Amino acid sequence: MGEFLRFENITKRYGQNTVLDNVTLEIQAGEVFSLLGPSGCGKTTLLRICGGFEPPDEGRVILDGVDITNVPANRRAVRTVFQNYALFPHLSVWENIAFGLKATGQDAKTILEKVPKYLELVQLTGYEHRKPGQLSGGQRQRVAIARALINRPKVLLLDEPLAALDLKLRQRMLIELDTIHDDVGITFLFVTHDQQEAMSISDHIAVLRNGRVEQVGTPTELYEAPRTSFVAAFIGDTNFFEGTVETIEGDYCTLNIDGFPEIQLFNDKKVHCGEKIHVSIRPEKFFISAVRPELTDAKTNLLHGKVEEVIYVGPHTRYWVRVQDWRVSVVQQHHGYGLDERRIKWDDEVWLWFGADNAYMLEHYAEVDEQLLALPDLEPEELEAVVEGGTQEVGAAE
């Protein structure tokens, strides 16, 4: 697959606010590509520019080798599924799905052949005569998807399509969307502020912040190898540390952190002694025990601390552990859980350990990232407030 959809140096302003700032993205044919970021980052504006609903102030949109920047929305091989579905309430499911075919002048025979196929694709056979008001939220969404797909667009735009659904239905619809994508094989451009949605369905994700692209990568790349502290914080939870490189030995270095034990980590950025660096360590990379472990790997970091908070959430337990001056977030998965076992509790002294390969050096800190440096001392709701509140400087609605 080669480059299929390209946003080239896209800039969009509303008055004095720059909502998109020189954005360039390349999307491959047939993939699910997500635009991910907090409110106000510009992701929906970029989607609307792709659909022809907004013109860019600068830049071009190239689709399958053709510049469509100035092509009207109704003449683009692009269709949109909106957050509110935008179905015609007075039309039946059949009539809603057939609407696009009628609008393009398809004959009755073609309509009679195609509509049942798309009803089957979205698992709505038997619902042909119902009106949108007689359907559940998930069913209305599937009608909207079928209506958008029936004219075989080259790109399907999905603007927060799951936002109006409850958690379990969102999870089920993600699976259904993925199945539909596999069946039709066209390019999906998916907009969301929910990192779990993006991680679940995407081949590639672009993380946007303040109208700029922070990082593009696969879900695994963004989670395991974030370039910036914003990406590390937005894609899941993490612990941030700042320190000075003390020694270098082969592919590894030791980091001196004020108020924290010295740690070893993989020197993937090839830093030098004396450099100040920032590091991200995911909570699940830590092991935790009330008993000091017998470690055999010299590249394993061992820490001693005291538990300040314990939250049991079913599949795992989250601990906040005070290690000298730092508060470390730790997640322990429940591969087995004996109700009669003695569990780690508040105020227990514990041992934490993690491999040097599981601490990841960050390339960039700026503005909100300096706030994120203090996150080991923040509660989960405070973390969300920093990430959301610190990224809305543009102030324009998407």
Image: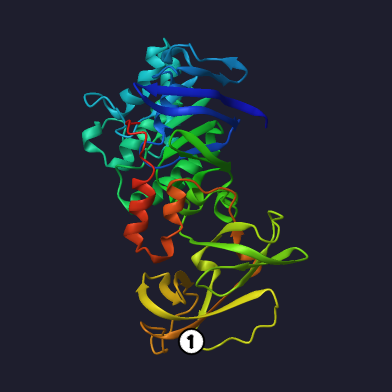
Residue at 35 percent across and 24 percent down: it is: 16
Label 1: few (<14), some (14–19) or many (≥20) C-alpha neighbours in 10 Å: some
Check disc 1 and report its element: helix, strand or loop: loop
Residue at 44 percent across and 55 percent down: it is: 372
In the image, residue 135 above or below residue 171: above
Residue situated in front as seen by the camera: 253 or 187: 253
Viewport quadrant of the N terminus: top right
The percent coordinates of residue 283 (x first, y second) are 49, 66
Identity of the residue furthest to the right in this view: 250
User: Does the rendering let one see residue 209?
Assistant: yes
Residue situated in front as seen by the camera: 132 or 234: 234
Q: Is residue 348 left or right of residue 3?
A: left
Residue situated in front as seen by the camera: 67 or 152: 67
The percent coordinates of residue 33 (x first, y second) are 53, 37
**Amino acid type indicated by mark 1:** Ala
The percent coordinates of residue 7 (x first, y second) are 54, 25
Residue at 62 percent across and 67 percent down: it is: 255
User: Does the rendering let one see residue 113?
Assistant: no
Viewport quadrant of the C terminus: top left
- Residue 243 sits in quarter: bottom right
- Residue 272 sits in quarter: bottom right
The percent coordinates of residue 359 (x first, y second) are 60, 63
In the image, residue 94 above or below residue 331: above
- Residue 89 sits in quarter: top left
Q: Is residue 116 left or right of residue 27?
A: left
In the image, residue 173 above or below residue 237: above
Where is mark 1, residue-wise? 290
- What is the total number of numbered labels drawn onto the structure image? 1
